[in-house]
Image: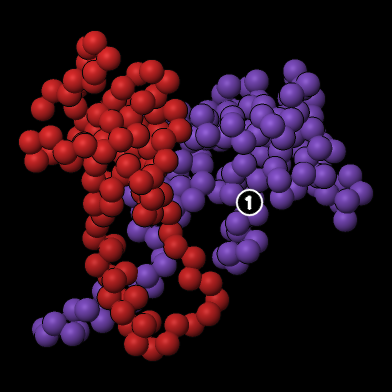
Amino acid sequence: MNLSWVISRNAIRKPWEYEAVLMNAESRKKALHYFYEKVVGPLGFKFTPDEELMNFLLEQEVILENKHGIPFCPCQPLRHNRARDMQIVCPCIPFHRKHFDEIKRCWCGLFVHKDVLDPDKLPQLSPKDVNLE
Amino acid sequence: MKAVELAGNEIVICNCGGNYYAVQRRCGHMNAPLDMGTLDGTYLTCPMHCVQFDVTNGEALSGPVPADFGKETPPPMLGEYFQNVGMLMKHIRTESIRTYETKLAAGWVQIAL
């Protein structure tokens, strides 16, 4: 086996493909919570009061971040089109502001409007349902 | 943040709202100088690949953020170079960074080496 063969076999993975890393999920969740709060607060949103849901969604984001290097929204599909995928990086509120203001929550429900006390009453409506498409 | 060198140890002192933490200056991913990054609360972000660390315990919280090469195909030689770099980079692990005990005394930050 010569060296060039080894290099070419290993180089099948493109350099921009992400190598999965595994970090402590609890610590990362805490850090994401800290950073997200700073972003969504000025936008009029807060974390959902449903702590179980919040923990579950943050955990899913940590899994996605470990896999892709970026904490994507766990409730929207990746299309492998960077421009579109960047619009679902959590918190994706700025990219879907009109829609989320209309339904008073973000798509997955991790964030709700600051005046919302009972997030269960908020239905998950698509942009079409609220006449935005 | 302030970088200092003490007895051959490169250290970054972080002032987190009056609490001082000292961590190794070199990133646990690719050795970039962390004092050139950003400190938010107790979270330190590396300036090179945005790896994040908790300065209270040195724990690595995330891996490097993947670069965007856009849609443009690089020239063949550059593409080959990127492939080799990518091949090497996939073996690089992000490690937690070392922390040092600190103590405030008479307005000085003391670091235990």
Which residue is pictured at 42% across the width and 41% down the height?
Answer: B38
Q: Position of residue A44 (x, y in %)?
A: 74, 30
Locate the N terminus of chain A and report the quarter of the image it occupies. bottom left
**Up-down relation of residue B73 to residue B23 (above or below):** below
- Describe residue B76's horizontal placement relative to residue A76 as left or right: left
Which residue is pictured at 28% across the width and 48% down the height?
Answer: B33
Furthest residue toward bottom: B76
SS category of the residue bearing label 1: helix
Residue B41, quarter of picture:
top left
Chain corresponding to purple in the figure: A
For the residue carrying disc 1, how many other residues have a C-alpha within 10 Å: few (<14), some (14-19), or many (20+)? many
- Describe residue A113's horizontal placement relative to residue B35 as left or right: right
- Describe residue B42's horizontal placement relative to residue A64 as left or right: left
Residue B8, quarter of picture:
top left
**Up-down relation of residue A119 to residue A17 (above or below):** above
Which residue carries the number 1 mark?
A: A88
Regarding residue A111, the answer to whether it shows in the image is no
What color does chain B have in the rendering?
Answer: red
Q: Tell me the chain of label 1.
A: A
